[in-house]
Amino acid sequence: MKRSVIFFCILIITLFTTSIYAQVTPIEPEDEEEETEKTDAADQAGKDKFLDRLVFGGNFGLSFGNYTFVDLSPLVGYKITKKLTSGVGFTYQFEKYKDPYNNPFNYVDDYKASTIGGKVFSQYDILYGIFAHAEYELLSIEYEFLETPYETGKFNVPGLYLGGGYNLKIGDNSALQIMALYNFLSDQNNILYDNPLTFRIGFLGGL
């Protein structure tokens, strides 16, 4: 009786193992290599597609002398569609003015100021290089007047810009951007943006 039970258990285990082995198809080395190549190609295509949609640009300026001005305002965007691009930007500006003649009747006092901040933006291509532009910016300004009475200050300046511009192509994948924007948060008492109308010239291009 015991032998019959043992033989029956061995038979069940053998049939179960054979069934599992029959259902599992072994992967040949060539098939595994082909699958790996397909996966790598798909991953690379996804990376290439992502990089193709990235754009870079911004505004940059330098001026030295009695009036020193440095502007570093890069931006990076992503083409969500062929017409719509959204992204973020960073702004750093430094200004310094020094009257070489120490003229007491000079309207502008000697000063220096540092500005740092960021923005988010969207652009929509309309037709033949014409685009609409929307942007929110927040800047922090710290300034010093270098004459008596000595004065320092620091404040934040928000900006909400709406307007448009034109892309002047300078290559297959780059353009010079000319924009006219209206700042709906402009303030007449703001020493940075007392005029709501702003004109910009910048650069935008892809990889």
Image (tube, rainbow, N blue to C red):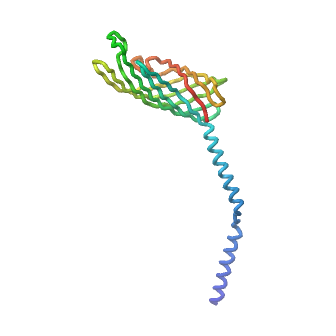
Q: Determine whether, in the image, residue 111 is placed left or right of residue 74.
A: left
Q: Residue at x 69, y 62 (%)?
A: 29
The N terminus, quarter of image: bottom right
106 relative position to 125: left or right: left
Query: In x, y percent, where is residue 166?
Result: 61, 22
Residue 167 figure quarter: top right
Quadrant of the image occupied by residue 67: top left
Could you say which is closer to the camera, residue 22 or residue 41? 41
Q: Residue lying farthest left?
A: 149
Left/right of residue 171 with respect to residue 199 in the rendered view: right
Where is residue 120? Give x, y as percent.
Answer: 51, 31
Residue 84 location in percent, x, y?
61, 31
Q: Residue at x 53, y 30 (%)?
A: 121
Question: What is the x, y in percent for residue 110?
Answer: 35, 18
- Quadrant in the picture for the C terminus: top right
Q: Which residue is farthest bottom?
A: 1
Q: Nearer the viewer, residue 179 or 61?
A: 61
